[in-house]
Every structure is written in C-alpha cells, then in structure tokens.
C-alpha cells in the first residue's frame, strides 16, 4: 500500500462507504477491493468516495475497472462519487 494512502470505512443502513485518501497505487486498489469483498455479505451497495485522492496510478485504475463488473454480477452495485470518480469507474458507476 502506498505510504500516504488511507481508506476510511463507514457502514450506514446496508451501504458501505469507503473514503479514499492520498495516492492510490495498484496494491492500495487491491486492498480496497479486499475490504469490499470482506464486507459484501452485510452491504447491499458500495460507495467509493474519491474527493480526497491525490494521485491515481494507471495500474490502480486497471485493477478497479477489471473487477467492477464481477462485483456487480454478484449483485453488489459499486458507485463512485467525487471529482476523481471518472478516473476509476466505468461511466455507468458514477454518481454526481
């Protein structure tokens, strides 16, 4: 995980909220997906908040884009919010 990366986790009424902060590299992206997978049984949807991200490495973007469809096939919608949402998610997964 990137030295200056943090993820804050909050659950609210069946929704899992992940606030990403710092620089998102490939290992950090995999760690975020692990958190989602570990908690998917208690969450009906996931919100990934991107406003506090500084840098998004190309490899991190690929990790997210390669895995979002499989999560949604497992009936777990993943929605991205914030100014950097478009850098991580397919267009259909972005909330304004």
Image (cartoon, rainbow, N blue to C red):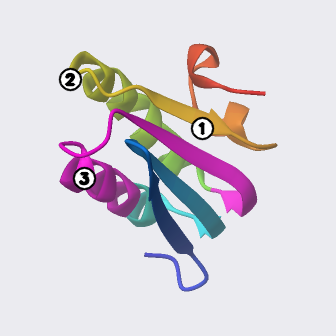
Residue 55: name its quadrant.
bottom right
Q: Which residue sits at x=38%, y=64%?
A: 27
Q: Tag 2: Cα neighbours inside 10 Å, few (<14), some, or many (≥20)? A: few
Query: CB of mark 3 within 8 Å of CB of mark 2?
Result: no
**x%, y% of residue 58?**
58, 47
Left or right, 61 with respect to 34, comes to: right
Q: Is residue 38 magenta?
A: yes
Residue 34: name its quadrant.
bottom left
> Residue beneath label 3, please?
39
Q: Is residue 81 magenta?
A: no
Left or right, 72 with respect to 52, comes to: left
Q: Which residue sits at x=78%, y=27%?
A: 96
Find the magenta span and give its range.
30-56
Query: CB of mark 2 within 8 Å of CB of mark 1?
Result: no
> Residue beneath label 1, please?
88
**Among the two numbered marks 2 and 1 on one chain, the one whose residue lies closer to the N terminus:** 2
**x%, y% of residue 18?**
51, 56
Secondary structure of the residue carrying tag 1 is helix
**Among the two numbered marks 3 and 1 on one chain, the one whose residue lies closer to the N terminus:** 3
Q: Which residue sits at x=75%, y=44%?
A: 84
């Amino acid at each position: 995980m990137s030295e200056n990366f943090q993820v804050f986790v909050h659950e609210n009424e069946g929704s899992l909220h992940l606030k990403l902060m710092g620089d998102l590299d490939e290992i950090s992206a995999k760690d975020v997906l692990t958190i989602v997978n570990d908690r998917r049984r208690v969450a009906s949807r996931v919100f990934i908040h991107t406003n506090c991200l500084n840098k998004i490495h190309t490899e991190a973007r690929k990790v997210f884009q390669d895995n979002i469809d499989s999560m949604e096939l497992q009936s777990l919608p993943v929605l991205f919010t914030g100014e950097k949402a478009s850098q991580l998610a397919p267009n259909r997964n972005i909330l304004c």
